[in-house]
Image (cartoon, rainbow, N blue to C red):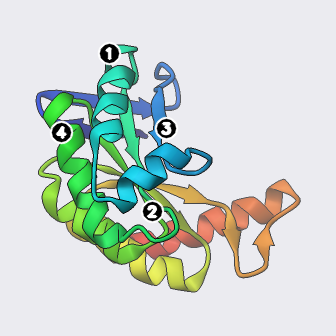
Amino acid sequence: MVTVVTGKNTEVKFGQGLPTVIIAERINPTGRKNLAEELRQGRLDIVKTDAKRQSDAGAHIIDVNVGAVSVNEVEMLPKAVKKVMEVTDKPICIDSANPKAIKAALDVYPYKALINSVNGKEESMEEILPMVKESGCAVICLTMDEAGIKNDVESRLNVARKIIKRAEA
């Protein structure tokens, strides 16, 4: 199986037997006080700079995460996605735990995105999978559910199967 995500004039394929794909994850305010503060102020200078640097350094996909205390993700995530599109043609990974923010970002991204992420929790599958189906984007699946992260391989595979079954329904 080959997964494809796209940006303006750019297509990235990944899957078994294909070369490793680099997803740049610098645009994330976790542990970055200056980025978190800038996002709270509604500014995107660091986002723009980080996107350009990561793209120039060879990243294939640019992950965009604006989740921080007192940041309105529904407002800022689509703005950040637009800002990233100004400086790179690379595909974007929309990274949020907030389904409304993901939807808002998908609404401004005219290409095939990657969503980070859905998991095996009922709420996550109910909120994220319909957006995936509607937009045709790809999604990262985390093998955890209401009971948390599984300790053994078979349990993790069972969660993965549950997510796939739900996505295909």
Left or right of residue 147, residue 10 in this image: left
Indicate the amino acid at tag 4: Met
In this orientation, which residue lies closer to the viewer: 57 or 125?
Answer: 57
Earlier residue among tags 1 and 4 = 1
Answer above or below: position of 5 versus 110.
Answer: above
Q: Residue under circle 1?
A: 56
Name the side, left or right, on which 110 lies relative to 14: left
Relative vertical location of residue 19 with respect to residue 122 in this rendering, above or below: above
Residue at the image position 41 percent from the left and 56 percent from the top? 66
Q: CA distance from mark 3 to mark 4?
A: 15 Å
Q: Picture coordinates of residue 13 (x, y %)? A: 35, 31
Query: Is tag 1's residue or tag 2's residue first in the polypeptide sequence?
Result: 1
Task: Answer with the quarter of the image where residue 3 lies.
Answer: top left
**What x and y, as percent, mark residue 119?**
58, 68
Q: Could you tell me which residue is drawn at 31 percent across and 42 percent down?
A: 92
Q: In which quadrant of the rendered view does residue 130 lie?
A: bottom left
Comes first in the chain, label 2 or label 4: 4
Measured in 3D between alpha carbons, the distance from the residue under mark 1 to the one under mark 2, in whole angstroms, is 24 Å
Q: Is residue 137 visible?
A: yes
Graded by Cα atoms within 10 Å as few (under 14), some (14 to 19) or many (20 or more), the crowding at tag 1 reads few
Q: Amino acid at mark 3?
A: Glu
